[in-house]
Image (cartoon, rainbow, N blue to C red):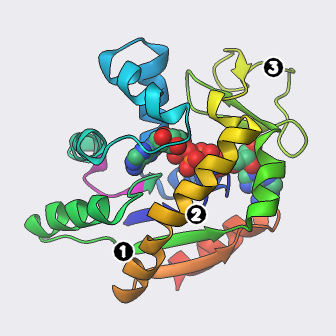
Amino acid sequence: MKIIMLGAPGAGKGTQAKMIADKYGIPHVSTGDIFRANIKNGTPLGTEAKQYMDKGLLVPDELTVKILLDRVAQEDCKNGYVLDGFPRTIPQAEVLDKALAELGDKIDYAIDVDVPDENIVRRMGGRRACLSCGATYHIEHVPPKKEGICDVCGQPLVLRDDDRPETVQNRLNVYHEQTQPLIDFYQKKGVLKTVDGTKDMKDVFADIEAVLKA
Ligand code: AP5
Ligand code: MG
C-alpha cells in the first residue's frame, strides 16, 4: 500500500502517518524528518536544507526528489510506505509518478488532512519535536511523560526553528501557493480522500482507517 499524506504544515500529517505506519506495518517516510536528521548531524545536505527551512521556504526540488527516490528504493519500502511531506510541488508529484510507473506501480491513496489556517497557528506553538527519532508531542494535546524529554528515546524535546509564528505564516503561504494544487492533481487521478483534521487525533485516525478499508 502506497499512501501520500497531504495537508498544511501542522495539519497532523506526521501524527497520522506514524499511526498508519504502526497499524499497517509500512515505513513512515518524512522528507522533513530526513532533513532535520541531516541538520542535527551537520551534514552538507543539512546545511543546505536549513537555509530554506528556517525561512519557511521549500527545499529545491532537485535535492528533495533525489533523497526521496533513494529512500523509497530501500528494501523496507518494497511492500509500500506512507509519504509525509512529499510531494509538495507538482513537479515532485510528476517525478514520483514517473518513477512508480517505470516499476508498473502507482500511488493508492492521497489523504488530505484538512485543517483551516486559524487552527494551524494555534497548534504549532505547542508542538515539541524530538530531533533524534522524529517523535512529535504537543504541550496540551500530547504531552510527554516527563516534561521536555522524548518518551521513545529519552532525548531532549525542542520547539522547531520553523515553528516560530512569523515562519508558520510563511509556511502557510508557501503551502497555499505550491502544495495545495496537489489536491486537484490527485483528485483527477481518482485517489484523493479528504478527512477532517480538526477532530481529535484518534477520530481523525478512525476516519483514515475507514478510507483505507473501503
Ligand atoms: P515538514 O517537516 O514536512 O513540515 P510541515 O509540512 O510544515 O508539517 P509539520 O511537520 O509542521 O506538520 P504535520 O502536518 O506533520 O503535523 P504534526 O503531526 O506534527 O517540513 C519542514 C520543512 O522541510 C518544509 O517547510 C520545507 O522547508 C522542507 N521540506 C520537507 N519536505 C519537502 C519537500 N517535499 N519539498 C521541499 N521542501 C521540503 O502535528 C502538528 C501539531 O499538532 C503537533 O504538536 C501534534 O501533536 C498536534 N496535533 C496533530 N493532530 C492533532 C489533532 N487532531 N488535534 C490537536 N492537535 C493535533
Ligand atoms: Mg510533520
Residues drawn in magenta: 77-82
Rendered location of residue 182, percent (x, y): 42, 71
- Residue under label 1: 108
- Residue under label 2: 7
**Tag 3 or tag 2, which sits nearer the N-term?**
2
- Residue under label 3: 148
Q: Nearer the viewer, mark 2 or mark 1?
A: 2
The amino acid beneath tag 2 is Gly
> Is 42 colored magenta in this rendering?
no
Rendered location of residue 164, percent (x, y): 73, 34
- Depth order, front residue of 148/210: 148
Q: Image quadrant of residue 196?
A: bottom right
Q: Residue at x 42, y 54 (%)?
A: 83
Residue 14 shows which numbered tag?
none
Q: Which SS class for mark 3? A: loop
Give how far apart the Cα atoms at labels 2 and 3 are.
Answer: 27 Å
Q: Quadrant of the N terminus?
A: bottom left
> Is 78 colored magenta in this rendering?
yes
